[in-house]
Amino acid sequence: MKTFRDALGREWEIELNIGTARRIRARVKENEALDVDFLDCAGVLTRLTDVFFAADLLYEVCRDEAQSRGVDAAAFGAALKGPFLFDAITALTAEYLDFFPDPTTVEKMRAVVDKIRAANEKLCDAICGATAKALDSALRKGETRLGALLSSDSAFSDSESAPSPK
């Protein structure tokens, strides 16, 4: 069993077993956002990169506990953000992998998770690099334009303040 805390400091338990798996499979039929076979490791692990899917699945896993606390899906999701959401998805992923009985399958799925994380890191690095490059370019262009404006303003101001020939 894994646990995580939400942004409001509430601790939640994630326990996947045959009972919760059956319950989730039944609820998936009712919830279009969870349109995935719960036992399809690659499908679930890939979809966990979608924060909306992950939050919906987390709620389904924690639904009984949430309902006993009077927390509906909207309130549950509202408390999942930033590092709290990251920690919750990490705990869910670990518990999900621990659910499967075949160590070979689990080992292969952990390799899939590592590849997904590496791909996300590369994507993030590429986005950050491209953004930094675009900002640097925009800054240089802005400085050039500002310099030109200041030069023309200075020339204009100098001609206005110079004594006029009579």
Image (cartoon, rainbow, N blue to C red):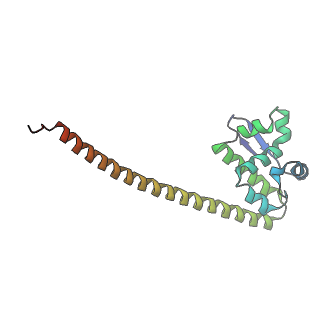
Q: Residue furthest top?
A: 70
In the drawing, does residue 149 fall left or right of residue 36? left
Q: Which image quarter: residue 155?
A: top left
**At x 19% / y 38%, what residue is drawn?**
160
Label count reads 0
Let me know if residue 1 appears in the view.
no
Q: Name the outermost residue toward the front.
A: 166
- Left or right for 103, reference 5: right
Q: Quadrant of the C terminus?
A: top left
Q: Is residue 68 above or below residue 1?
A: above
The residue depicted at 63 percent of the width and 44 percent of the height is 82
Whether residue 43 is situated above or below residue 83 in the rendered picture: below
**Residue 105 image point, x, y percent:** 80, 66
- Location of residue 84 in the rendering, given as x and y in whole percent from the top left corner: 67, 43
The answer to whether residue 45 shows anywhere in this view is yes
Residue 132 in the image, given as x and y percentages of width and height = 47, 55
Q: Residue at x 84, y 41 (%)?
A: 63
Q: Is residue 36 above or below residue 62?
A: below
